[in-house]
Every structure is written in C-alpha cells, then in structure tokens.
Amino acid sequence: MLVGNSARIALPVLQAVRSFGDETCFLAGSKETAALRWSRLCTRHVLIDFDDDERSVRRINDLAAKAPQAMLIPFDCEGIRLVNRVGGRLALSSIPVPDLPTLEMFDDKWRFYHFCVANGLPAPATRWIGSKENLDFSALEAQLGLPFVIKPTNCSGSLGVQIVGSQEIFEEEILLNPRYQHEPLIAQRYVDGMDMDINLLSVHGRLGALSIHRIEGSWMDFVPHTQLEEMAERLCRASGYHGVMNVDVRLDKRTGEVFLVESNPRFWASLVAAVGCGLNFVAESVKPPGPQERPRRLTSGRFHTRHPLLRPSAWRPLFSDSGETGRLLRARLFDPYSLGQLAREMPGMASRFLDRSKVPLRPLATP
C-alpha cells in the first residue's frame, strides 16, 4: 500500500516492488500520482487529501479492508508526514519511517547543514538568506567566493538551484527575475567536482543497508568509499534515524575532500539502479535486518539509466532472466505509464542528439 504525493518517486518504488515478486500494489495519492492508475504495476489508485486527515484515514482503511495483510509504504515526505500524524488510526503496519522532528530536520537544507556542523560531518560553508531581497552579491562573494550556489531550503529535484558565477547572472537569474520566487533561501559555497550519492536504510539509528554511487554519462556506478560509509553510520547514530534516506555528496576534484550537500529523507528517483545491481531498498524496508545482522552493502555494479527499450543489449534478459533483474526490466518496459513517459521524452532526446551531431569536427592537421 503506497502512500504519497510524488509520481516521480512512486514509479521507481512500484518497479522495485515488482522486482521482488508479483505483489499487488494499491496507491493512495493525489492528482499528481493519478496517472499511475494506467500503470500495470498499480492495481488501484485512490485519491486522498493530504490536508484532510479524516478523509485520508477512511480511504486508506477502506483499501486495507480488502488487503489486511498489506504493508504500508509511505514513499515521499508528504506520505511520511501523513502516516506520522494518523499512524495509530491506520489498520496497516508501516515500513520504517522517521518521526516528524527528524523528518523536518533532514528535509530542510539549512537545518541539515547545522546537523552536519554539530556532528562533525563535512558540509560546504552555508549562509542563511531568507527572502531574495536580502541577497548581497558582494558580501556573498567575499564569504563564499565565486561561484556560489543559491537554493531554497525546502525544494527537491534541483528546483530553484542557481549557480552564480558573476553579478550579471546573479541579477538576471535571481534578483531581477520575477519568476524566481522561491524562499526561504540559503547561499552555499560551490564545490567544483563530482556528484556522488549515499543511499541508506537505518533502523532506529543502526545502519541496515547502504550503497554509494556516482554518475558517468548514462551509467550509474556503485563504488566502495570508506569515508562516506563511515559518515553514513555516524549520521544514522547521531540522529537515531529510522527509514530510508538519500544524501547528495560532492567530491572536490582539487583536494579529494567530500562534502554532504543535502539530504532526502525518503525514497529517491534513481532507486531502481541499486535494485538492478542487487540491493533492493524497498524489499529491505519491508523486512528490515535484525539487530545482529550486518548491514547489506552494495559496493560494485553498473546500471544504465536509459529506458531498456533504447538498449538492445537489455532485450535478451527481458525474456530469459526469471530473477530480479529480468522482473525489473519487464516492469520498466511492459508498462503503459512508463512507455508514455518515454514517448514524451523522445522529442527532447532527439533534439539533443541533433544538436550534438551539428558540432563541427576539427579538421585533421595537414603534414
């Protein structure tokens, strides 16, 4: 029983569920997730109002009456907030989720920065701004250097994030831009380097599952990283965290230092990459490891992020693989909703391909 407000997160969670079995999935969501009723991975979609707890409890419990053995999976922050508010009145057990104070701390970039500072975890220097009217380019340049980053404290998916490399960009993209209305804002030192991610499951402050990945073009590589693994364990212990989390990391290309940039105390959009390489965070959440079990760690593997329809090398396992990998491929390919998404993305993909093909080749040097 999935509960949440984000179609971007719901789809990979549905795909992850299908990869470990032919489970029946109900989704209690909003108008944003309503199109998932066309997905073959979603048996039924019901609309709930995340501002009306009474109605939400009734709708979820009505579904629970049809599947009393179901497990509740709040997959995004709105779903987790709802379950925290009304959990005692729901007829289903839930996967691990953080309590409200912990959720709000990790879902806010400013509060996450202070958590890192208080617990000796490296984070880029950050300044509170509030409203964009409080921005002072000269002061931020002096404190943070150029470029620096302006971002809202409470948005996801890079919404409102702007890298500022000059006063012209600062004024054009933020200060004098009537469309830039995000707040509250913070300013953060820009770390020039590589993006990495920590993905984890924690059970009452004890690390239960962990992966670390970096992106190389269309590939997602899972790698070992001793320092980040230790940071993940410290983060879980210091917060007593209970649930899944994704943490954005930046690796400084000059010094090799790592910085924790922001956290997402929920499932994440690239979830299926770990599933495809052998670690299913949804399955681990449904059956969390016991206190004596060692954390499951994914330290190697490579996953292609493009749709399997566009990769002929993925076609054979679609039919020949009866395990998790094959089920995941079939969940991604043989699904009307996913194919509809691909169809909407194709014009943009074709345009980018044509743009690249127009780049003139450098002539060979003549002897």
Image (spheres, helix red, strand yellow):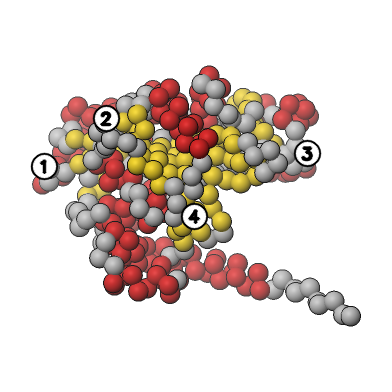
* Image coordinates for residue 137, horizontal then vertical, percent: 75, 31
Q: Amino acid at mark 2?
A: Pro
Looking at the picture, which amino acid does disc 3 mark?
Gln
Mark 2 vs mark 4: give the one in front.
2
Q: Which residue is mark 2?
A: 291
- Give the mark nearer the N terminus: 3 vs 4: 3
Which mark lies nearer to you, 2 or 3?
2
Question: As shown in the figure, which amino acid type bears the numbered disc 4?
Answer: Met
Residue mark closest to the camera, 4 vs 1: 4
**Quadrant hosting residue 161:** top right
Residue bearing the label numbered 1: 68
Is label 1 in a helix, a strand or a loop?
Answer: loop
Left or right of 312 in this view: 27? left
Q: Position of residue 356 (x, y in %)?
A: 65, 69
Residue displayed at 81% across by 77% down:
364
Task: Identify residue for label 4.
Answer: 220
Comparing 233 with 153, the one in front is 233
The residue lying toward the viewer, choosing from 157 and 316, is 316
Q: Amino acid at mark 1?
A: Pro
Secondary structure, mark 2, is loop
In the image, residue 248 lies at what x, y percent? 52, 40
Q: Are marks 2 and 4 in contact (CB under 8 Å)?
A: no
Question: In the rendered image, which residue does mark 3 sit on?
Answer: 167
> In the structure shown, which secondary structural element does the residue marked by tag 4 occupy?
strand
